[in-house]
Image (cartoon, helix red, strand yellow):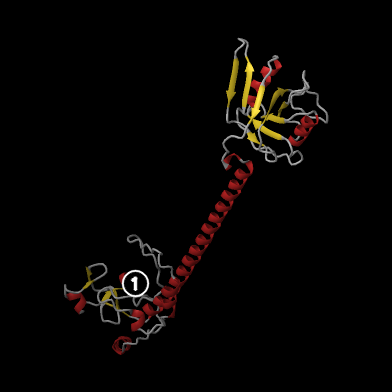
């Protein structure tokens, strides 16, 4: 957009800026003429607005303010009065920002939008009686970021991507929670099988004179403490002996002998279907943290031979030597 006028010092001033934006439905052509304002309302609305023209033989360009009616109504009203082009300047407080107008009902006349500051400056000159010549020419194209509809498209795309990311996160989280739930469930089943296996182990009470109490070479590998008369011990299928209170929590967590790594589930013939399901269904990246120290985490409902209750369930052993020792002790 280029304007030319004579200032108060009788000097011709030319101003040029690449600041206007052609309307979406406007012909992209060059036009020129004398800038003319509507009388009264600067917005140029209404069916037949009056333009302050003291000439009839020169082409003129209507300068109107945005607001009150559609762009098509402003442009058509000025065209009916004989304008060769229409310049719409933006609303107050918008600075020099512009948008691309949409005027589908007025697509045969050149129409552009300029910023509010630029439009107010030109309108002030015309109001003071200065004759301003304007030329609208095709300048450098604006990028798509100037298009309001393109901004809408980017906003919608952003929300779609955000929603898809949230949905993916929820799916992954739900799948992880389900996998962890299955892992805990199978772990509980496996501990239940371990309890059954522990219930089939030989349990006895040490007496004075037993080899375990007289030799310092016999110590519990779990607590690293020597055996004393009156303590209750558990004999594993591999013939290793441990304190009952020490080995049972260990077996519930690991199910193997602390010394030789013998698997008590296999040694006692306990069904291992739960263990296989655990390996198949557990996620590979699940981390199980074991906290040591403090009170035992598991409570094993086993019968203590030192209990005052006379009724105790009979233990059955796959190892015949354990079975014979148990029967001899009862006799």
* Left or right position of 257 against 122: left
Quarter of the image where one finds residue 1: top right
**Residue 164's spot in the image, x, y percent?**
56, 56
Residue on which disc 1 sits: 254
Residue 244 versus residue 77 in the image, above or below = below
Q: Foreground residue, 211 or 224?
A: 224
Q: Foreground residue, 241 or 115?
A: 115
**Residue 249's spot in the image, x, y percent?**
35, 69
* Left or right position of 236 against 180: left
Question: What residue is drawn where x is 67% and y is 33%?
Answer: 112
**Residue 257's spot in the image, x, y percent?**
29, 75
Quick one: SS at disc 1?
helix
Residue 12 versus residue 142 in the image, above or below = above
Crowding around mark 1 (Cα neighbors within 10 Å: few <14, some 14 to 19, many 20+) is some
* Left or right position of 84 against 231: right
Locate the C terminus and report the quarter of the image it occupies. Answer: bottom left
Whether residue 209 is visible to the viewer of this picture, yes or no, is no
Q: Foreground residue, 199 or 182?
A: 182
Question: What residue is drawn where x is 55% and y is 53%?
Answer: 161
* Left or right position of 320 against 55: left
Outermost residue to the top: 9
**Residue 132's spot in the image, x, y percent?**
67, 20
Whether residue 284 is visible to the viewer of this picture, yes or no, is yes
Outermost residue to the right: 47
């Amino acid at each position: 957009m280029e304007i030319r006028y004579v200032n108060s010092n009788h000097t011709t001033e030319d101003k040029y800026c690449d600041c206007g934006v052609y309307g979406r439905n406007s012909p992209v052509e060059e036009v020129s003429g004398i800038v003319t304002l509507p009388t009264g309302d600067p917005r140029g609305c209404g069916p037949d607005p009056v333009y302050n023209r003291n000439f009839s033989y020169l082409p003129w360009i209507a300068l109107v303010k945005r607001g009150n009616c559609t762009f098509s109504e402003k442009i058509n009203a000025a065209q009916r009065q004989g304008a060769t082009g229409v310049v719409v300047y933006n609303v107050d407080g918008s600075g020099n920002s512009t948008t691309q107008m949409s005027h589908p009902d007025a697509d045969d006349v050149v129409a552009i939008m300029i910023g509010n500051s630029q439009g107010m400056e030109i309108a002030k000159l015309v109001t003071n009686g200065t004759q301003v010549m304007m030329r609208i020419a095709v300048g450098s194209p604006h990028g798509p970021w100037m298009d309001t509809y393109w901004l809408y498209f980017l906003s919608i795309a952003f929300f779609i991507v955000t929603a898809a990311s949230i949905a993916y996160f929820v799916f992954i989280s739900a799948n992880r929670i389900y996998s962890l739930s299955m892992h805990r469930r199978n772990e509980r089943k496996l501990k239940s099988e371990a309890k059954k296996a522990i219930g089939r182990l030989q349990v006895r009470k040490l007496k004075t004179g037993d080899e375990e109490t007289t030799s310092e070479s016999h110590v519990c590998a779990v607590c690293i403490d020597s055996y004393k008369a009156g303590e209750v011990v558990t004999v594993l299928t591999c013939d290793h002996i441990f304190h009952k209170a020490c080995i049972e929590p260990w077996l519930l967590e690991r199910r193997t002998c602390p010394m030789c790594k013998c698997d008590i589930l296999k040694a006692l013939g306990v069904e291992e279907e739960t263990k296989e399901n655990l390996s198949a269904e557990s996620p590979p990246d699940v981390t199980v943290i074991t906290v040591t120290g403090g009170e035992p985490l598991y409570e094993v409902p086993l019968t203590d031979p030192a209990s005052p209750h006379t009724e105790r369930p009979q233990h059955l052993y796959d190892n015949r030597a354990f079975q014979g020792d148990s029967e001899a002790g009862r006799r």
